[in-house]
Amino acid sequence: MFEFQSFPTNKVFINQFVRFSRAFPCACILDSSGHNDKYSRFDFIAGLGIQEQIWVESTNVFDFLKDFHQTHQEWMFGFLSYDIKNQLENLSSSNPDRINFPLAHFFIPQILIYQRNNELVIGIHHNAWGMKSHEGIYNSILSFSGNNTLFVNKPDIRHSLTKEEYFKKFA
């Protein structure tokens, strides 16, 4: 469960917030980019820090996720890997996995922040040990000036085919 408090917002907040989020080992920021439709609820929403998490690297992904969700009926952020298709449709592929992500990773954040209709809301998980007050988090974001790269991971990504080899495959 989260305890929420509202704050004023401005146009520079989201940029400050993105830089601030780098100080956390896990963060997910979903930004509408100004797109508004009947399904839109937030201008942006984000989860920072890990209160609880689940990594699924084996079969039965949805069983694990269902159990996790039933145990922790809270806000969750995460992803499902494309390779889950192999479990759903009895498929397989021999493509090399160079990223080594799990089939699924979801986390319950320590801090939940969203903006809706020019209202900024900060939520702190009730079990988040050592978290600042709502005002402390808000002021930390606004005053953040560093290029914090503490948890920025720069993966070694290289192409496996040359441009010519790639085009030959489709010629």
Image (cartoon, helix red, strand yellow):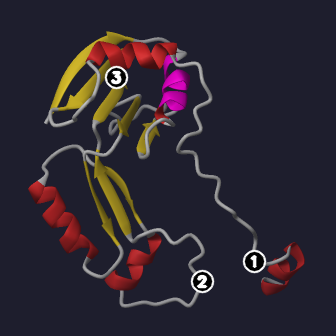
Q: Is residue 5 left or right of residue 10?
A: left
Q: How crowded is the residue under tag 1: few (<14 C-alpha within 10 Å), some, or many (20+)?
A: few
Give amino acid for label 2. Pro
Give the camera-side residue of 167 and 12.
Answer: 12
Q: Is residue 127 above or below residue 95?
A: above
Q: Closer to the observer: label 2 or label 3?
A: 2
x and y, in percent, of residue 23 in the image: 48, 35
Q: CA distance from mark 1 to mark 2?
A: 10 Å
Residue with the mark numbered 1 = 160
x and y, in percent, of residue 42 in the image: 35, 30
- Asked if the stretch drawn in magenta spans residue 18, the answer is yes
What quarter of the picture does the C terminus occupy?
Answer: bottom right
Give amino acid for label 3. Arg
Q: Is residue 11 above or below residue 88?
A: above
Give the camera-side residue of 22 and 70.
Answer: 22
Give amino acid for label 1. Ser
Q: Are marks 1 and 2 in contact (CB under 8 Å)?
A: yes
Residue with the mark numbered 2 = 96
Question: Of helix, strand and loop, which mostly describes the magenta segment?
Answer: helix
Q: Secondary structure at mark 2?
A: loop
x and y, in percent, of residue 67 in the image: 14, 65
Can you name the residue that lies furthest to the left here? 71
The residue shown at (27%, 48%) is 76
First to last magenta residue range: 13-20
Q: Is residue 145 above or below residue 69?
A: above
Asked if one can make out residue 117 in the rendered structure from this viewpoint, the answer is no
The residue shown at (16%, 37%) is 127
- Mark number, residue 116: 3
Q: How crowded is the residue under tag 2: few (<14 C-alpha within 10 Å), some, or many (20+)?
A: few
Q: Are marks 3 and 1 in contact (CB under 8 Å)?
A: no
User: Is tag 2's residue or tag 3's residue first in the polypeptide sequence?
Assistant: 2
- Asked if the stretch drawn in magenta spans residue 151, the answer is no
